[in-house]
Amino acid sequence: MRTQDVELTREWVAELLGQADIEIQARVRGFLEEIHFEEGRRVKKGQLLYTIDQSELLQQVTAAEANLAAAQTRRANAESDVRRYRPLAEMKAVSVRDLESAEAKFEAATAEVEAAQAQLELARINLSYSEVRSPMDGLIGITQAKVGDYVGTFGNSVLNTVSRIDPIHARFSITEREYLRFARQLTPEKIAERADARPLELLLGDGSVHPHEGRAVTADREINADTGTLTIEASFPNPEKLLRPGQYAKVRAVYETVEGALLVPQRAVQDMQGRYFLWVIQDDQTAANVPITPGSRYNDQWIITEGVAAGQRVVVEGLQRVRAGIAVSASPYQPPVEAD
């Protein structure tokens, strides 16, 4: 048996997300006239993506302009009446009540102008929505609407999604027990020094490891009562733009470093009704069955915490032929070579 420092890891299945995934929605109703981008390619912030038929929206702007002009005319007439009634009221040629009525009409006409101006501004804003532009730099997907579709209605407003994929985010869940273990390791000093930001690895679907380490960036506020897990989101640099939203991967993290761990091959450990044993070769070359306390597993080995000491020899192969007190002829164990 040998000792060495080992890093114990955990792996969790994760779904990849963009750092930001923004749905592109039609904010006005109309027929889709043009598509101005290549699907699955990068787009720039402010880039024109879709054009929606403007004919109805232009009519709304024209109607709003006419309403504003009419309201301004009514206000001008009401203002003229006020200017005319004031000197007459001072000369007692008209009653004070007539002047107050003229002033009230002017105030009402002013409010109508303001309302008409707001309606015109709204109509112009809606007209601007007929040109759908990208809200950010990112990767755009396959369009959900084609030229000629009537968009902007309930259930038919989402046109596409733009994602910022550098960095890429990985969302995964850890158990409540894992959360408690990690949380208890975070002292105020570690938090202040940001030493809690453990480096994470991302294992891809083809078995390769993403070349850039990541960091956990956020966690949900609560443990999911149905699954007993806490959702974590980690961020990984993605300068090559290799990773895309929707992919599945595994997040791997070192959760503990064991110094001087005593390691034995897992195949040497015998489990008998929840109790564990090793066959140990004693100094007189006879075998003895020794109870042990195993700890965590490390690759194809087991960390032994009690029962044996470094330097002792254990039986790995031929366990079925070993008996207590019987002399053993042993040779060094050669781990099997994995095929490529």
Image (tube, grey):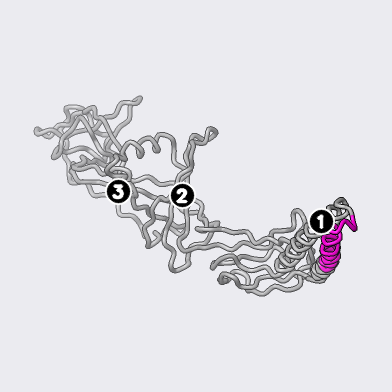
**Residue that carries the numbered disc 2 in the rendered image:** 233
Query: Magenta part mainly helix, strand or loop?
Result: helix
Q: CB atoms at circles 2 and 3 under 8 Å apart?
A: no
| Magenta-colored span | 69-94
- Say the numbered circle drawn on residue 195: 3
Asked if the magenta segment contains residue 79, the reply would be: yes
Residue 148 in the image: above or below residue 104: below
Q: Element type at marker 3? A: loop
Q: Amino acid at mark 3?
A: Ala
Q: Pointer 2: residues within 10 angstroms few (<14), some, or many (20+)?
A: some
Sequence-wise, which precedes: disc 2 or disc 1?
1
Task: Say left or right for 216 vs 127.
Answer: left
Q: Amino acid at mark 1?
A: Glu
Q: Residue at x 85, y 67 (%)?
A: 73
Q: Please identify the quarter of the rendering in which residue 3 is found.
A: top left
Task: Say left or right for 39 vs 301.
Answer: right
Residue 38 in the image: above or below residue 307: below
> Does residue 56 appear anywhere in the picture?
no
Using the image as rendered, state which of residue 44 and residue 264 is in the foreground: 44
Between marks 2 and 3, how big is the CA–CA gap? 17 Å
Task: Say left or right for 7 vs 107.
Answer: left
Q: Please identify the quarter of the rendering in which residue 306 is found.
A: top left
Sequence-wise, which precedes: disc 1 or disc 3?
1
Sequence-wise, which precedes: disc 2 or disc 3?
3
Of marks 1 and 3, the one in the foreground: 1
Of marks 2 and 1, the one in the foreground: 1
- Say the numbered circle drawn on residue 103: 1
Q: Pointer 3: residues within 10 angstroms few (<14), some, or many (20+)?
A: few
